[in-house]
Amino acid sequence: MKAATLFEELAAILPPANFKFIEEEMRPYECDGLSMYRALPKCVVLPENEAQIADILRICHAHRVSVVARGAGTGLSGGAMPDPNSVLLSTAKMMRVLSVDPLACIAVVQPGVRNLAISETVAHHGLYYAPDPSSQIACSIGGNVAENSGGVHCLKYGLTIHNVRKLRVVLMTGDIVTIGGDGLDSPGYDLLALMIGSEGLLGIVTEVTVKLTPKPQLAVVAMASFATVEAAGAAVGDIIAAGVIPAGLEMMDRIATRAVEDFVHAGYDCEAAAILLCESDGTPEEVADEIARVSEVLRKAGATDIKVSKNEAERLRYWSGRKNAFPASGRISPDYYCMDGTIPRAQLPRVLNEIAVLSEKYGLRCANVFHAGDGNLHPLIMFDANVPGELQRAEDFGADILELCVEVGGTITGEHGVGIEKINQMCVQFSPKELTRMHDIKHAFDEHALLNPGKAVPTLHRCAEFGKMKVSQGKPMPFADLPRF
Amino acid sequence: MIEAWQSQIKAAAAKGDKLAIVGSSASALPAVSTIDTRQHSGIVEYEPNELVIVVRCGTPLATVEKTMADAGQMLAFEPPYFGAESTIGGVVATGLSGPRRPYAGSVRDFVLGTKIIDGKGDHLSFGGKVMKNVAGFDVSRLITGSMGTLGVITEIAFKCLPLPKAQQTRVFDLNAADAIDKMNRWYGQAHPVTATTWVGGRLYVRLAGAAPAVKTAVEKLGGEALENDAAWWADWREQKHAFFAGETPLHRMSCKSTAPPLDDAEQAIDWGGAQRWIRAPLHDGAKARYWAKQFGGFATTQSAGSARQFSTEGLDPALLDVHAKIKASFDPYSVFPGLEKSPLLQAGEG
Ligand SMILES: Cc1cc2nc3c(=O)[nH]c(=O)nc-3n(C[C@H](O)[C@H](O)[C@H](O)COP(=O)(O)OP(=O)(O)OC[C@H]3O[C@@H](n4cnc5c(N)ncnc54)[C@H](O)[C@@H]3O)c2cc1C
């Protein structure tokens, strides 16, 4: 008897509607939020439960066919971009909140559940899920776990890694494992820390236990205008120096405020070189006290204007501009490219100046929105893909920004992940030996390197071709270890 | 120092020798030679405005905390010392967090980056010194709490937080079940609670943060004030409280915060309900492990005033395999202690 083909085996375990291999049906999956990278997969599978995921992986493992996981496809680094030789596994049919325990402040959800849906589901208990990426109405918790996503409130409330307790994961072999626990620590190595941010390279997340946070009684945002970007940057340091950890601390430059103001009418001061949004939350007494202190610091730091939200509607309006910075850029430019470097905040003036110089050099505009509290920059490079050469210029501009971030002691990605986009810059940030340990970790979970191939951790071979191997003490590192995938 | 250690590790690897990594306390494990982490000490970088401190492994914890306190900041996971000489490298290797753990986070939550020398003698750097970093796998957090099994931690970058402006502890006479209920309820109500412990029929609740927030919470929660509360919490953190005294073995259980109290046990309840301590004969260890498993956790048996026990008990076989492969990658010649045999277990933390 002839051995069953991959497609026959997959068709046997999935309802017909959940197995797609015709080109038109696969088109919607050809890219994630980084739409300049596109490819069609071998086929698309939409499992409805963990058992089906385990079966799919077991089948693919037996056939040595690779698998790319996909949540909502809002990722900005090409992490969920298909591969022509891979099966694309979408979690779109796994959107149930499985349980909520308001007393223990936890919820157990399937991987396809939207980030905001968790907060909506638990709102009547006075709780919410704290990490709030701007894409929260669309992105999935499985994607958040894979990227260790952050949001504008992460300075105070932490990233995904600080808000996830336990995962159920299917390994490439089809083994189902529990990582983390219901307590605050678990036996063995901290594999939870390894899984979070692993970009779909180590296993498929099938269940996520998230920590819920009590909703603060009150939140108020102060919005300050500055005549120079440097002054705004310095004010951020002054707020921290005053012993305040605001619930959110964001900065936008004039190109960004002008773009969003036309779009959402948030009430931004478009004459200011930069504005800061600084949120305080807690009890009314606490908020009043903190806003008074912050306003004082902002004034001393040279703010030309300070507005404080008077009610919830106004607070949300101030934030709406920041949260819509990406789509707004899309309105003033045919295409935009969002970068994600993180830097020590003291380097901000230098980095912003150099970005301005690069902007001249490449002849492309660049707006800057910035998770200022934690040093995470989002330069938005504007270009027109229909103009020959502009896409390439935008990518080169972006790569220069990332390398600049590494040079000043920062990192190439704060929250969007490496994916396919920043794979070359990983060679700048890590030495071959460090990358080899990461390959070993990959190998420990996925021996045949079948999960999300070609993403997140470059082969040493690729680094050699890129020609920007990290050098140690002026000497190129020896190049002995062989790449595994 | 780094180069000397690298050669020492390479030599041990070549000969198949074992190395002991020690900080302030001597190792009880057999080893041919020793790496004394205190030889690599000092604060490399501290920028209070960046909320980042970078320190060498052998720096005394006391020095780190004093330096930060002078700038109005702290290590928010409130590490226990278990000995005045305790080093920061030991804290990270053992992954020890104190009473503030459920409210602020654990050691690994505040680790931004680590440098290590692995079992091949390679000096490697993972993570960094910025708040957000998702480039590659989060190896620096994997190393945190790995008990010296993956290498010598040489340098650590931490996220710092401001010291609270005000603090007060309130005490309530309650039985264990009611105390568990209160701990959980208050956790879900946005009070500035930073520690909760139930011991000897009393629930201790530490409130800390902005002065107005503490004041409001005191009015809402009630209870009696505890005099000299900082000393009480330090004793509790260091396991010098009377509960930890005596010879009866100590069992630690990590479990879901809402788990009911154990019947008929001499127990204390900590970490908002998520950490339980039992004084009971050794043979009760199995019972403790069984119980903890029922409530989504695990149990270990240890001596008071010492490090957390490293355990791989109850892990899925597939995960044990992952552990073994990670260990083999970082320590292929078994220079460092094996997964079940960290020297830190026997000898208090480094
Ligand atoms: C307008 C806009 C604003 C954004 N704002 C933010 C922001 O503020 N902060 C931020 O951090 N990000 C932001 N992002 C990026 C993106 O939304 C996040 O990275 C998000 O977590 C991706 O989730 P997703 O469900 O869309 O994942 P996808 O894009 O589908 O996948 C992302 C990665 O996760 C993997 N993956 C998905 N599901 C699983 C699973 N179940 N198991 C294992 N691996 C899986 C994929 O293989 C891929 O590598 C923004 C994106 C857009 C478009």
Image (tube, rainbow, N blue to C red):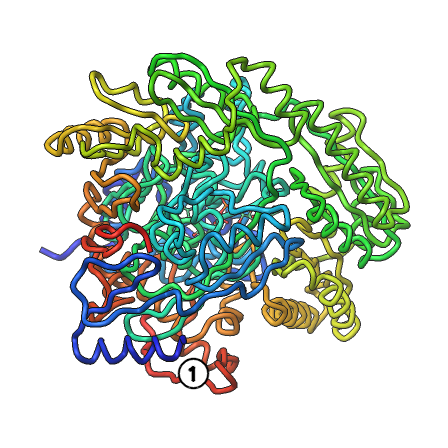
Residue B153 is drawn in which quadrant? bottom left
Residue B15 is drawn in which quadrant? bottom left
Q: Secondary structure at mark 1?
A: loop
Residue B116 screen position, x and y as percent: 39, 66
Residue B142 screen position, x and y as percent: 37, 55
| Residue A419 shows in this picture | no
The residue at the point 32 percent across, 78 percent down is A482
> Please, which chain is the residue tagged with disc 1 on?
A
- Observer-nearest of A75 and A29: A75
Quadrant of the drawing holding the N terminus of chain B: bottom left
From the viewer's perspective, tell me whether residue A239 is left or right of residue B177. Answer: right
> In the displayed structure, would residue A72 be above or below residue B60?
above
Quadrant of the drawing holding the C terminus of chain B: bottom left
From the viewer's perspective, tell me whether residue A259 is left or right of residue A27. Answer: right
> In the displayed structure, would residue A222 be above or below residue A312?
below
> In the displayed structure, would residue B94 be above or below residue B199?
below
Q: What residue type is disc 1 on? A: Met
From the viewer's perspective, tell me whether residue B305 is left or right of residue A282. Answer: left
**Disc 1 C-beta below 8 A from ligand 1:** no
Residue B136 screen position, x and y as percent: 45, 61
- Observer-nearest of B88 and A186: B88
Count of numbered labels shown in the rendering: 1
Residue for badge 1: A477
- Observer-nearest of A125 and A222: A222
| Residue A387 shows in this picture | yes
Residue B177 screen position, x and y as percent: 34, 14
